[in-house]
C-alpha cells in the first residue's frame, strides 16, 4: 500500500526502505564496473534487463531468462550470479561487474585472451557469461584442476559445444598466471 | 564457355598418404592451383578468430542487441489449443491499450504444410490453429511490458476440435485429421513431388529406391532386422529468433539473426512485391541457428507488417518457451530395417520402411545415409510423414542423416557380429570410400580399437564398451555465391559479401584466403559480411559455406591483384605477369626488385580497385545441379569411435572418450574445424542420451519448454575428444575447401549406441538412451508403455 503525503514527493514511497514500491518506475542507483548510475525502473525489472536496456551493457546476454543457462552471468561483489534471477531493485549497494568491466582498457583479461587463443568461442552468445564464471573461479582458486573448471561452468549452456576448448583455455590461463 | 580455358596441374589425394597431381582444364581467369597446405602461409593455419576480441569483451552486436531510435517492441499471441477453429478475433480492446501502436492478425501462416485450396471454395473463411503455440496475431507497443499486457486483451473465440499428438495414434484411419485435404509445403525441401495422402499419412516417398530389394533379401544368406525410434529434438539456439524490422517509404531494412541474409532478402521482396534493391538484410554476430534460422517465418512477417503499420522500427524476439514450441525441431522417426547379406558381408538387399512426424510440417526424413554409404544394388526406401497436432519441424544439423545413421549403423554393427566379423572388417568390404578407409585405419589406431572386448563381457556393474560408426554427407555448393575484394589506395584490403558468420568462423577463413593471395597477413584484411548491400553470398546451412564462398573470395583477390600489378609493373620495370605478392611486398619473382604492398596501392589512380567473383563450377564437374545449389561428385565422410561406461544399476550412460577422423577437402583453419567437430559430437551425444521434446498427449502442451527440463549435455557430460582431419585434395575449385558442420554429428549417436551394446550386450534401438531406457532394455524395470 502506498502511503505518502504530497510533501514527501513522488519518490518517497519508492525508496528501498518503504514497505511497498511500484507498480510504477522507481529510481535506483547501481554501481556497475566502477561507475555509479541512477536509473528509473519498474520493480519487476531484472538486473539483466536493467544492464541491457537502460545502461546499454549488452555484453550480458539473456537466453533462457530463468536461471537455467547462465548466459547472463555477472558478478555481485565478485561472486557470479545469474542476472536474470536478480531484481535490479535488490542489488542495493553491491558492486556489479559485467563482461564490459573485465578488460583493462584495450588489454584483455588473460582468460579473455586464452578464449581467443584456444578458440573457446563459436557463435559467442554464451561466451561473456562463461568468461565471467571462469575468471571468478581463478580469483578464488588460481590453480584449478580440470574437474574444478567443469564444476565452475557446469551451469552454463553452450549449444555450439565449446566446452573442450573452454577447459583448455582456462587451464592454460591458470598455468600462465602461475609462471 | 566464353572464357579461355587453360590446362593446369592440381594436387590430388590425401596428404601424408598418397598425394599426386591431376590435370584440369579450368577457365583462364581462375586463380592458379594452390599447393598443399604445408607450402602456404595463411591458409591451413589456425589463425585466431578475427571477431574473437569483440566476442570475449561483449562488444559484438547480436541481433538482440540492436536498438534503433523510436523502436517498438512486439509480442505474438499464440494458440493455447492444439486444434481449434477460430470463430472470431477481436483486437479492439488491445488496440486501445496504452502504448500500443499496431496490431496484426496472421491469416496465412508460413512454415508448415498447407492445404491446397479447392477451386471455387472460399479461402479458409475461418482459420484453424493446429498446435499449441500456433501464432494468431502480433502487436507492437512502446515497451515489451505494454505489448505483453495488450496481448492479453485480444479476444479469440475458439471452437476446440479433436486432436492427436501421438505418432502411432495419428496413423490410425479414425484419428482426428490435421489436414482435411491434400497439402503442399511452402518451406524447406522445395517443391515436393505430389505424394499420396491418407488420413494423416503423407507418402510414401519411394524415390530413393533402386533395383529389387525383395529379391535381394530372398537371395541373402543372412537377414538382420530391427525397428528404431528417434525422438524430437529442438534446436535451442542460445540467441532466440529475433529481428528488428524497419519499414520506410524508400525501402525495408531488416536486422535479423539468420543463416541466410540473401535468402531472407529474396523472400521478403517476394512477400511484399518489393524490388530486391529496396530490401536490405543485415546480421552481425549471430547466436546459433543449426538449421532453424534459414527462412522467413511468421515472426518475421509479423514484425515487418507491424513496422509498416506503425511507421516505426519494430523489434521482435521469441522467448524461450516460443523457441521450444514454435521455432522448428528435428522430427521424430520410426524406422524398420531389413538388411540381407552373404556370408562374406556383401549386402544383397536392403528394405527400409520409415515414418515420422514433423508435426504440421513435412520433412520427417531418414535422409540419404542408407542409400549412399554402402554398396547395395537392390535397395528400397519407403518413407512417409505423419501429421500430428504439434509444432512444425524444420532442418536441423544433418537433417535425416542423423536419425538415419543412428539406425543403419546399428544394423551394420549387428550384421558384423552375426557374421563373426569385426565392424571395421565388414566396412572394409562394403564401403567403397577410399577416404573412410583411411579414416578407419587412422581412427582405430589412435583410439585403440584393438582393446575392444566381446559384447557384454565387461565385468561388474559399471560396464565399459567401445563402438564406432561412420558418417556420410553430400558436398553441397551454392553456385549463386559472390564476393568482392577491394584494394584501397592506402594499402588496406576489404572483403565484402552477404555471407554470414554464424559462429563457424567464415570471417577468419575469408581473411586467410585473401591474405594468402595478396601476400598479406589475415589480420590486415577487413572482412565486411552479413549485409545484402554486398554481393550475394551463400547460406550457412548444409555445410556449404566454405565450399561456396572461399573460391570466389580467392578469385576476386587474384583478379584485384592482377589489376594492381598492371598499375605498378612499369615502376618495377617488369610485366604484370612477372610479378608476385609475398610477405607484404609486390615484386619480381627473383626478388631483385620489389615495393611494399602499401607503396604499390599508393600508385592507384582511384581510391580503390575492386573485383567481384562468383562461384564457378567444380573443375571436375558437379554430380547434380538443383537450382542455386549443386552436389559435388565426392561426398564428405567421417568415422567416429566412442568409449562409454554404462552403470547397470542406475542406467546411466557416460561417454568417456571420442576419437573423430574427418575430411573437408583442404582444411582452412584447423582449430576452427576442431571447434565445429566438437560441436557436432557434443550435440550428437546430447541427442543420443539426453534430449527429448515431451508433449502431453492429453493437452498438446510441451511439458519441458525451457532449458531446465529439456536436458542438454553440458560440461560435466563432455568427454575427452580427439579430432583428426585429413587433408584431402580433389582439384575442384580455387580453394578445394569443403564444410564440416554436418558430417561431424552424423556418426556420433550410432557410435555411442554401438559402444553401449558392446558394454551391456543389449541393443538400444530407442532414443534418447536415458537411464530409464537402459534399465528397461536390461529388464530391470518394466517397459514404459507396458500396463502397470
Image: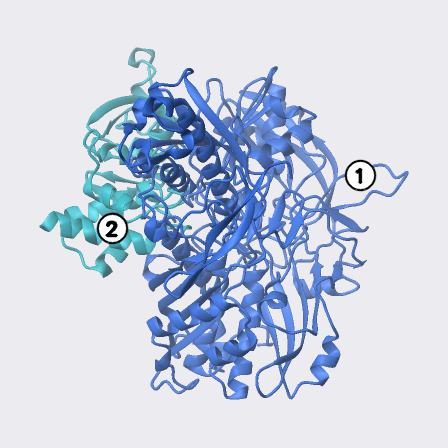
Chain colours: A cyan, B blue
Estimate how packed mark 2 is, as few (under 14), some (14 to 19) or many (20 or more) residues with alpha carbons within 10 Å.
many
| Rendered position, B290 above or below B590 | below
| Residue underneath mark 1 | B124
Q: Is residue B782 visible?
A: no
Tell me the CA gap for discs 2 and 1: 57 Å
Quadrant location of residue A47? top left
In depth, the one of B238 and B588 nearer the eye is: B588
Assign a secondary structure to mark 1. Answer: loop
Task: From the viewer's perspective, tell me whether residue A126 is left or right of residue B94.
Answer: left
Above or below B317: residue A153: below
Numbered circles on residues, count: 2
Q: Secondary structure at mark 2?
A: helix
Alpha-carbon neighbours of circle 1 within 10 Å: few (<14), some, or many (≥20)? few
Q: Is residue B34 left or right of residue B231?
A: left
Residue B621 at what x, y percent from top left? Answer: 61, 51
- The image quadrant that residue B403 belongs to is bottom right
Dot label at residue B187: none
- At 53% from the left edge and 32% from the top edge, which residue is drawn? B148
Relative height, residue A119 to residue B411 (above, below): above
| Residue B8 x/y as whole percent | 50, 48
Front residue of B8/B81: it is B8
Observer able to see residue B314: yes
Residue under label 2 = A169
Using the rendered image, report if marks 2 and 1 lie on a common chain.
no
Give residue B216's position: percent from left, percent from top. Answer: 71, 80
Which residue is rendered at x = 48% and y = 37% of the image?
B555
Q: Which residue is farthest left?
A: A179
> Which label sits in the foreground, 2 or 1?
2
Q: Position of residue B256 (x, y in %)?
A: 51, 33
Q: Residue at x 43, y 63 (%)?
A: B685
Q: Are marks 2 and 1 in contact (CB under 8 Å)?
A: no
Q: Nearer the viewer, residue B635 or B647?
A: B635
Amino acid at each position: 500500500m502506498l502511503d505518502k503525503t504530497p510533501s514527501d514527493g513522488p519518490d518517497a514511497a519508492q525508496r528501498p526502505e518503504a514497505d511497498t514500491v511500484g507498480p510504477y518506475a522507481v529510481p535506483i542507483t547501481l554501481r556497475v564496473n566502477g561507475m555509479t548510475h541512477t536509473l528509473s525502473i519498474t520493480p519487476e525489472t531484472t538486473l539483466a534487463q536493467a544492464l541491457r536496456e537502460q545502461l546499454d551493457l549488452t555484453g550480458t546476454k539473456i537466453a533462457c531468462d530463468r536461471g537455467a543457462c547462465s548466459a547472463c552471468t555477472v558478478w555481485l561483489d565478485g561472486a557470479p550470479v545469474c542476472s536474470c534471477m536478480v531484481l535490479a531493485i535488490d542489488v542495493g549497494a553491491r558492486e556489479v561487474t559485467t563482461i564490459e568491466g573485465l578488460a583493462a582498457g584495450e588489454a584483455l583479461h588473460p582468460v579473455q585472451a586464452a578464449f581467443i587463443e584456444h578458440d573457446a568461442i563459436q557463435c559467442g552468445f554464451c561466451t561473456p557469461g562463461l568468461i565471467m564464471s571462469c575468471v571468478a573461479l581463478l580469483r578464488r582458486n588460481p590453480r584449478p584442476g580440470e574437474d574444478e573448471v567443469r564444476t565452475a561452468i557446469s551451469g552454463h549452456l553452450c549449444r555450439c559445444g565449446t566446452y573442450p576448448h573452454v577447459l583448455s583455455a582456462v587451464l592454460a590461463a591458470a598455468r600462465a598466471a602461475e609462471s | 564457355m566464353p572464357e579461355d580455358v587453360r590446362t593446369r596441374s592440381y594436387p590430388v589425394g590425401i596428404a601424408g598418404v598418397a598425394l599426386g597431381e591431376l590435370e584440369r582444364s579450368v577457365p583462364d581467369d581462375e586463380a592458379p592451383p594452390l599447393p598443399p597446405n604445408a607450402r602456404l602461409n595463411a591458409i591451413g593455419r589456425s589463425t585466431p578468430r578475427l571477431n574473437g576480441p569483440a566476442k570475449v569483451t561483449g562488444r559484438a552486436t547480436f541481433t538482440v542487441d540492436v536498438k534503433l531510435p523510436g523502436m517498438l517492441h512486439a509480442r505474438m499471441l499464440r494458440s493455447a489449443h492444439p486444434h481449434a477453429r477460430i470463430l472470431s478475433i477481436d483486437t479492439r480492446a488491445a488496440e486501445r491499450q496504452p502504448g500500443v501502436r499496431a496490431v496484426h492478425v496472421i491469416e496465412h501462416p508460413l512454415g508448415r504444410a498447407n492445404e491446397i485450396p479447392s477451386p471455387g471454395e472460399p479461402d479458409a473463411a475461418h482459420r484453424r490453429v493446429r498446435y499449441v503455440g500456433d501464432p494468431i496475431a502480433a502487436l507492437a507497443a512502446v515497451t515489451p511490458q505494454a505489448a505483453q499486457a495488450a496481448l492479453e486483451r485480444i479476444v479469440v473465440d475458439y471452437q476446440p476440435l479433436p486432436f492427436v499428438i501421438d505418432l502411432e495414434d495419428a496413423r490410425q484411419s479414425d484419428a482426428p485429421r490435421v489436414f482435411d485435404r491434400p497439402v503442399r509445403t511452402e518451406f524447406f525441401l522445395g517443391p515436393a513431388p505430389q505424394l499420396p495422402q491418407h488420413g494423416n499419412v503423407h507418402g510414401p516417398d519411394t524415390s530413393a529406391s533402386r533395383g529389387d530389394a525383395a529379391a535381394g533379401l530372398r537371395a541373402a544368406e543372412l537377414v538382420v532386422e530391427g525397428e528404431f525410434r528417434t525422438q524430437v529434438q529442438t534446436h535451442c539456439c542460445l540467441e532466440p529468433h529475433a529481428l528488428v524490422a524497419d519499414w520506410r517509404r524508400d525501402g525495408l531494412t531488416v536486422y535479423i539473426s539468420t543463416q541466410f541474409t540473401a535468402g531472407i532478402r529474396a523472400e521478403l521482396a517476394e512477400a511484399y512485391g518489393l524490388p530486391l534493391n529496396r530490401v536490405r538484410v543485415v546480421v552481425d554476430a549471430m547466436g546459433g541457428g543449426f538449421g532453424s534460422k534459414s527462412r522467413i517465418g511468421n515472426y518475421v512477417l509479423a514484425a515487418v507488417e507491424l513496422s509498416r503499420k506503425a511507421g516505426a522500427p519494430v523489434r521482435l524476439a521469441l522467448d524461450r518457451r516460443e523457441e521450444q514450441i514454435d521455432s522448428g525441431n528435428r522430427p521424430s522417426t520410426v524406422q524398420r530395417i531389413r538388411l540381407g547379406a552373404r556370408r562374406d558381408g556383401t549386402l544383397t538387399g536392403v528394405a527400409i520402411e520409415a515414418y515420422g512426424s514433423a508435426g504440421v510440417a513435412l520433412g520427417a526424413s531418414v535422409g540419404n545415409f542408407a542409400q549412399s554409404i554402402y554398396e547395395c544394388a537392390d535397395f528400397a526406401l519407403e518413407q512417409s510423414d505423419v501429421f500430428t497436432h504439434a509444432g512444425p519441424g524444420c532442418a536441423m544439423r544433418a537433417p535425416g542423416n542423423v536419425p538415419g545413421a543412428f539406425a543403419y549403423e546399428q544394423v551394420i554393427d549387428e550384421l558384423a557380429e552375426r557374421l563373426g566379423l569385426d565392424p571395421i572388417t565388414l566396412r572394409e568390404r562394403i564401403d567403397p570410400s577410399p577416404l573412410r578407409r583411411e579414416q578407419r585405419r587412422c581412427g582405430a589406431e589412435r583410439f585403440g580399437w584393438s582393446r575392444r572386448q566381446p559384447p557384454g563381457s565387461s565385468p561388474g556393474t559399471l560396464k565399459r564398451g567401445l563402438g564406432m560408426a561412420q558418417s556420410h554427407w553430400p558436398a553441397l555448393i551454392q553456385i549463386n555465391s559472390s564476393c568482392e575484394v577491394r584494394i584501397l589506395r592506402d594499402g588496406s584490403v576489404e572483403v565484402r559479401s552477404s555471407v554470414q558468420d554464424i559462429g563457424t568462423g567464415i570471417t577468419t577463413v575469408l581473411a586467410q584466403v585473401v591474405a594468402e593471395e595478396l601476400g598479406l597477413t589475415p589480420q590486415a584484411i577487413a572482412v565486411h559480411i552479413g549485409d545484402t548491400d554486398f554481393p550475394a553470398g551463400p547460406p550457412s546451412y548444409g555445410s556449404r559455406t566454405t565450399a561456396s564462398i572461399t573460391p570466389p573470395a580467392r578469385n576476386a583477390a587474384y583478379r584485384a591483384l592482377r589489376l594492381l600489378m598492371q598499375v605498378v609493373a612499369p615502376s618495377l620495370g617488369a610485366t604484370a605477369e612477372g610479378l608476385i605478392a609475398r610477405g607484404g611486398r609486390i615484386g619480381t619473382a627473383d626478388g631483385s626488385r620489389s615495393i611494399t604492398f602499401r607503396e604499390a596501392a599508393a600508385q592507384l589512380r582511384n581510391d580503390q580497385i575492386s573485383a567481384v567473383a562468383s562461384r564457378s563450377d567444380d573443375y571436375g564437374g558437379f554430380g547434380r545441379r538443383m537450382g542455386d545449389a549443386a552436389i559435388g561428385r565426392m561426398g564428405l565422410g567421417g568415422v567416429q569411435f566412442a568409449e562409454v561406461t554404462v552403470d547397470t544399476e542406475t542406467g546411466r550412460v557416460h561417454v568417456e572418450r571420442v576419437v573423430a577422423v574427418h575430411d573437408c577437402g583442404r582444411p582452412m583453419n584447423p582449430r576452427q574445424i576442431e571447434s565445429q567437430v566438437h560441436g557436432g559430437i557434443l550435440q550428437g551425444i546430447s541427442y543420443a542420451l539426453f534430449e527429448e521434446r515431451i508433449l502431453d498427449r492429453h493437452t498438446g502442451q510441451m511439458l519441458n519448454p525451457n532449458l531446465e527440463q529439456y536436458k542438454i549435455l553440458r560440461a560435466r557430460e563432455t568427454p575427452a575428444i580427439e579430432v583428426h582431419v585429413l587433408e584431402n585434395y580433389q582439384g575442384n575449385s580455387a580453394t578445394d575447401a569443403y564444410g564440416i558442420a554436418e558430417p561431424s554429428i552424423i556418426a556420433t549417436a550410432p557410435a555411442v549406441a554401438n559402444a553401449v551394446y558392446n558394454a551391456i550386450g543389449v541393443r538400444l534401438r530407442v532414443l534418447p538412451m536415458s537411464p530409464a531406457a537402459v534399465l528397461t532394455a536390461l529388464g530391470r524395470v518394466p517397459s514404459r508403455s507396458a500396463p502397470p
